[in-house]
Amino acid sequence: MAIHIVEEANRCLHCKRPMCQKGCPISTSIPQVIQLFQEGKMSEAGQMLFENNPLSVVCSIVCNHEGQCEGHCIRGRKDTPVHFSAIESFISDLYLDRMAVERAESNGHMAAVIGAGPAGITVAVELAKAGYEVTIFDSKERIGGVMRYGIPDFRLPRTILDRYAARLEQMGIKFRANATIGGALEIHDLFRDGYESVFVGTGVWRPKTLGMRGESLANVHFSVDYLADPDAFDLGETVAVIGVGNSAMDVARTALRHGARHVTMYARSKHVSASSDELVYAQLEGAEIVYGKAITLITEDGPVFKTAIFDEDDKVTGYQDELDQQHADSTIISISQGPKNKLILTTAGLEGSDRGLLVTDENGMTTVDGVFAAGDVVTGSKTVVHAVAAAKEVAESMKRYMEAKAAAGEEGSEPAGPVHHVHDTMDV
């Protein structure tokens, strides 16, 4: 492994205009990190990674590297791209345990973070580094959000998230587990108790339904529920998965690891939305994919499909008349998720789009003064690195907001706050 990483680092051309960095959603300084690695400056390289991306360890493992940094590598045009993910994983994993964590001196101001996923953790870290007293509230018992309850352990070991939890505690970040804001506590209670701004990073945990007969049957499940606790399910030997995204690949691979002998994923067309790496892994582990199957209903015996008719360009031109009943002990629906609506229902003035996503302005502030949001709850389901990148920007907006509020308080008047130009960011 070490030899491989060194060889990969030595293949870097150190481009003056690094396309790999442009392909990274959070603009990681890839050539500089590799240069420090080659010079044996591991701590400096790790610090550079973590300063830019607090979840560098996670992103080095779960990012879609082929579509981002490695997919933009110049070497990849005629050869194999430099596998920066392996280099980043080695450096950041080493640095996570070696980094010197110094608790910043408190500036006397409090901020609340709702949701302990990628966006929430990022905001908490950025604010804590600036001296803010931060408390994270989450409905689950441990931090991680989708990283812990949506990504299988064989892809992202839980031990990494446990190590992060220890680091957050060392930074002075408080964590209140099993606390659903929008239940017994509401956002207005947070302001009442002294929090000067609130960040919402609750993600998307409501499964998107097919809206057809059979979804309530006992042997039908949603991917977000299954991945949260696979041990709670007895799927049987034959499993049908509706969908071919990254989540569907995780479901298929998890089911095979939990006793299923035959797992088949069904796609409406011949397009697979999952990354090619995840597709290859799923197929290597025994999952099958059947294309051109449009789900029409689900029975206790399994899903029923219409079979697509393709033209010479592999476009669907119609469907065969005869329905196709496929046998499955269990059917898992994996066609995306949306946000839950507890916060909107319990917070006066908090607006959502027609998809239930929170509406924010260019500063990341919602339609309620002092309440900010970023990540999947604003954009819809995206990747960990996209959530981190957006949350970093919003953390800066929160700092400016609280600084302005404090300055106005010292002058004996209420601050005007950021100017709101509200727009729906669901298509961002």
Image: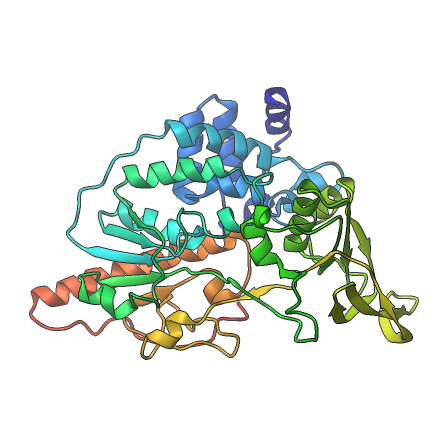
Q: Residue 33 at x, y = what percent? A: 49, 33
Residue drawn at (23%, 67%) of the image: 189
Residue at the spot x=31%, y=30% of the render?
A: 100
Classify the position of the N terminus by image quarter.
top right
Where does the image place residue 236, in percent across and percent down from the top left? 72, 50
Residue 278: image x %, image y %?
Answer: 69, 46
Left or right of 307 in this view: 189: left
Determine the residue positioned at 39% across, 54% down: 120
In the image, 338 versus 213, the foreground residue is 213
**98 up-or-down from 245: above or below:** above
Q: Can residue 25 be seen?
A: no
Residue 336 in sight in this render? yes
Instruction: Name the image quarter holding residue 20.
Output: top right
Looking at the image, residue 382 sits to the left or right of residue 44; the answer is right
As drawn, 63 above or below 32: below
Relative depth, front residue between 217 and 364 = 217
Residue 292's quadrant in the figure?
bottom right
Q: Which colour style is shown? A: rainbow
